[in-house]
Amino acid sequence: MSDDGGVSLVYLMERAVSELRALTGVDIAFAASVDSVSGRLIVRCQEGNRTDGLLGLSAAPGRGLGWQSIERRRPVVAARHDHRAPARHRHAWSKIGEGIQAIFAVPVDVEAGERIVLYGAMRGTSQISAAAIDAASRVAALFEMYLGERQTGGTTTGLGLAQLCALRDSLHDIAELSTEPVVQKSIEDVVARLGRAYVAAPPRKPPSVFLTPRELEVLGLVAAGLSNAEVARRLNIEESTTKSHLARIMRRLQANNRTAAVRVAQELGLLR
């Protein structure tokens, strides 16, 4: 899977994992995505690992911390000594051989078929700080922007994420060609600043106001006065699916209810 510039989603997952580890200070960072055929959540890349126990690890729908984060649509944290953590989780951590004591999972807010989860894990402590979760959530926001660019064919940020990655790689290559330590350090500083510009600053409007064609369709019917059940019948979907769409819409538009969501969408020009 790649965008028009040839940058694959797995490649961006790898970059996100690197950013997550650098910004949060976790011992291990890794990312997983849902396989379109099996429906399982599969670990695609990792950094800071001592073994290959994580890579390729998969979980069936509804099983594991990653699926919990997807279903709850928020970060989930678990510690090995926590009696509330299912025994199968603690057993799985032991089998991996990484000495994991605490782990968190942060979902990337994307459409079904491209569900992604970012993970961070600690070996020497069972504590995960709120700052680490916040930083990981900001990295996850990058994927929201990137996927918005792919679905709309444009960019939701001034500099597209694919272009950002290509630019950073080019700078790395230039740094390696230079024999001057001062030049190398200057280039690496610029590369680091490019990453912080996307991750350190609070997410702006684009991720919140991007709505998929289906979400716009749902909201348009709501604006026309249809109930959730009527929207579901009109679109030939389950009512629970309609509610899920509306929950996502309200979160992105920062609206407390259906009426407010319609008003905000109209103000932003998303609905006529």
Image (spheres, grey):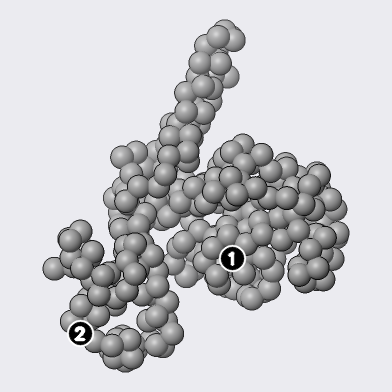
Examine the rendering and report whether any part of residue 160 can be seen. Answer: yes
Q: Which residue is at 79% across, 63% downward? A: 82
Q: Distance between the residues labelled 2 and 1?
A: 33 Å
Q: In which quarter of the image is the C terminus?
A: bottom left
On the image, the x and y values in percent for residue 112 come to: 47, 70
Is residue 214 visible in the rendered image? The answer is no
Residue under the image location 68 percent in, 73 percent down: 63
In the picture, measured across the screen, residue 27 lies left or right of residue 97, that is: left
Disc number for residue 225: 2
Q: Which amino acid does label 2 sit on?
A: Gly
Crowd rating for badge 2 (residues with CA inside 10 Å; few <14, some 14–19, many 20+): few
Residue 157 placed where, x, y %?
A: 33, 44
Q: Is residue 228 above or below residue 147?
A: below
Q: Name which residue lies at 64% across and 76% down.
A: 62
Q: In which quarter of the image is residue 271?
A: bottom left
Q: In which quarter of the image is residue 158?
A: top left
Residue at disc 1, secondary structure: helix
Q: In which quarter of the image is residue 53?
A: bottom right
* Residue type (three-letter) at the residue carrying disc 1: Ser
Name the residue carrying label 1: 69
